[in-house]
Image (spheres, rainbow, N blue to C red):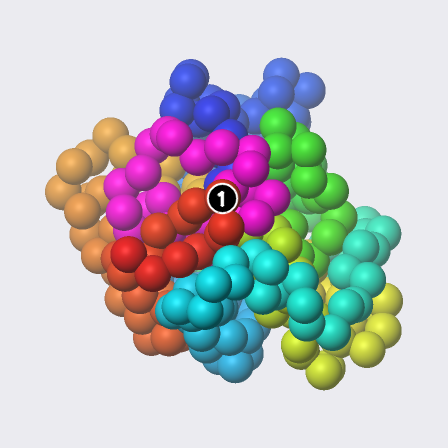
Amino acid sequence: MILWGCMAASGVLMAPRVQAQQSVDLIMDNFTSSVLSQTTVLLNNNAIEASMRNARSKSGKSAAAAGASARKVNLAYTPSAALQQQTVQNLVAKMQSKNTQAAQAVNNALGSGKASYGQLFTELVRESGLPANNAATALAAYLEIGYMIVNNVQNGITPAMDRALQQQSDGILSQNRSLTSPTTIAKLGEELKLQAIVLYLGWQSTLKNPVQLLQFRSGIAQQFRAMGLDMSKVKLTVNGFEKR
């Protein structure tokens, strides 16, 4: 996403104060396409399928408006350092059984004492004007970065599109009946933030290698299709995701 012109203009995501913790290049060097191949989105498939139903809708109502009409849930939350550290540890533990090297790469870049994925995410979404500590923003970021990777989109995404996708994501998550407390919302939001950052850094690590980039894009496309969302068949508009 939420590159909001930032990556397209300069190829650099982070503001200087974030770079001071650990250089972006160093972080990216720790990631390869194998990192992303071992991660799984931390949403249930029903939420992804709901996104596709909105994207396929041909009623005169926009996808974003359809999301807005759903049950409303307050998806804003205040993260804690303990929750963020636990979120990284949980992802690393899940990856450990499948790919020790990839799990170590994530831990080396984002583990305790390393770069804060929360700060990286805040910089990622800053120019959109959307709230960073909001589960709908986190889902929108994850989906938009996936969309950009699969469709080889480097620019042209506007804040209006970002807001529409966030509104659409709000509608999707508001239909999730398990999001019943600030605790569960914060947990999901942080998991999605971390997924978005890992996805973004994995993408960046392949940009200078055309063969690796092509393989990475193909792998991410397959990952989203497995979740019920074919990114090649949707387009991001001022109404959110719509069918091509």
Q: Residue at x 56, y 37 (%)?
A: 160
Residue 197 seen by the camera: no
**Residue 49 percent location from the top left of the image:** 46, 77
**Quick check: 91 above or below 194?**
below
Disc 1 crowd, CA 10 A, few/some/many (<14, 14-19, 20+): some
In reply to whether residue 205 is colored magenta, the answer given is: no
Which secondary structure dominates the residues rendered in magenta? helix
The residue at 60%/59% (across/down) is 65
Percent position of residue 126, x then y: 65, 31
Q: Is residue 38 above or below residue 237?
A: below
The span picked out in magenta is: 141-164
Q: Residue at x 73, y 42 (%)?
A: 131
Q: Is residue 237 left or right of residue 211?
A: right
Amino acid type, label 1: Val
Q: Position of residue 71 (x, y in %)?
A: 74, 74
* Left or right, residue 81 beside residue 168: right
Q: List x then y, in percent, for residue 204.
A: 37, 36
Q: Identify the residue shown where x is 82% and y is 62%.
A: 74
Residue 133 can be seen, yes or no: yes
Residue that sits furthest to the front in the current view: 60
Name the foreground residue: 161 vs 77.
161
Which quarter of the figure is the C terminus placed in? bottom left
The mark tally for this picture is 1
- Residue 158 magenta: yes
Q: Is residue 155 left or right of residue 77?
A: left
Residue named by callout 1: 238
